[in-house]
Image (spheres, grey):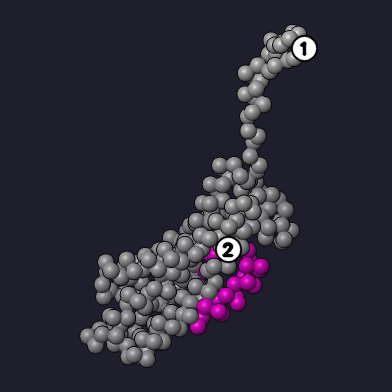
Amino acid sequence: MNPELSKIDGSTLVLSPLITKALKKKPAKPLGERKKAVLRQELMVLLGNTCVVASGMSVALPSVSLTQLTSKDDIFQLSTEESSWFASINSMACPIGGLIVGYLMDRFGRKNTMLLTNVIGIIGWVLLVTAPYQASRDAIFLQLLIGRFVSGLMMGAALSPIGSYSAEISLPRMRGRLILGSSIAIATGILLMYVLGFIIRNQFQLICLISAIYQCVAFCCVLPMPESPSWLLQKGLAEKARKSLKYFR
């Protein structure tokens, strides 16, 4: 008689506690739902959303800077009409960024599009930082508008790449909460800009410089991210797609 089994009434076999425990053991989680894979998916989405945080910062910039920019004692001295243009021109650029980003994502991939979006954001912030060094007030105002317009392109292009990336690397069970990260990132960026405006009052250039540095950090955060396996497979890069999918599973 197997020592793991015992008889009852000469006929009924009862499993020993050792075998019962083994049978009750939960089956292994499917690929992609194990703790390590889940953490990798969440981390990559978090890194990708750093650019979206910068978009929120750009949205909130007028709220913390117009008091200084419209002051008669400041170098900018924007009029009511000029300040309105400064606050709204980035919203005019957003649809353009949104239209362009679809082509960029299909042509260059999700990761490279996120990198390019960060580069555009850096250019926008640098234009704002260096605007006061122009020779005339009209030139200063023009550069401010160009900087805000470029930032608007970044805002319009920031959401789609990380949204597609989140959907393509995650399992359906996790997809909803990962995509939700973009909305949280925008709100975080707005809050961060309000905090900067509260701490650093009437320091437009310094606020923009800090934002530019943050955008550089966001660029670096995207570098270690693997490309989307779906896009790689679409481009016929099966081996790279396999390696990318293996990382997330």
C-alpha span from label 2 to label 1: 62 Å
User: Is any part of residue 22 visible from this angle?
Assistant: yes
Residue lying at the far front of the rendered structure: 9
Asked if the stretch drawn in magenta spans residue 113, the answer is: yes
**Residue sitting nearer the eye, 113 or 161:** 161
- Vertical placement of residue 65 versus 117, above or below: below
Q: Residue at x 73, y 9 (%)?
A: 9
**Disc 2 residue type?**
Gly
Label 2: which residue?
A: 163
**Residue sitting nearer the eye, 237 or 40:** 40
* Span shown in magenta: 92-117
Question: Mostly what secondary structure, the magenta segment?
Answer: helix
- In the image, is 89 to the left or to the right of 136? right
Label 1: which residue?
A: 11
Q: Residue at x 66, y 68 (%)?
A: 107
**Residue sitting nearer the eye, 34 or 51:** 34
Q: Residue at x 64, y 57 (%)?
A: 168
Question: Mark 2 or mark 1, which has the lower sequence index?
Answer: 1
Nearer mark to the viewer, of 2 and 1: 1
* Circle 2: element type: helix
- Vertical placement of residue 9 versus 176, above or below: above
Task: Tell me the quarter of the picture where residue 114 sits.
Answer: bottom right
Where is residue 148? Give x, y as percent. Answer: 43, 79
Where is residue 175? Give x, y as percent. Answer: 60, 56
Residue lying at the far left of the rendered structure: 73
Task: Please identify the quadrant where the N terminus is shown.
Answer: top right
* Circle 1: element type: loop
**Disc 1 residue type?**
Ser
Count the numbered circles shown: 2
Asked if the stretch drawn in magenta spans residue 187, the answer is: no
Where is residue 190? Give x, y as percent. Answer: 40, 68
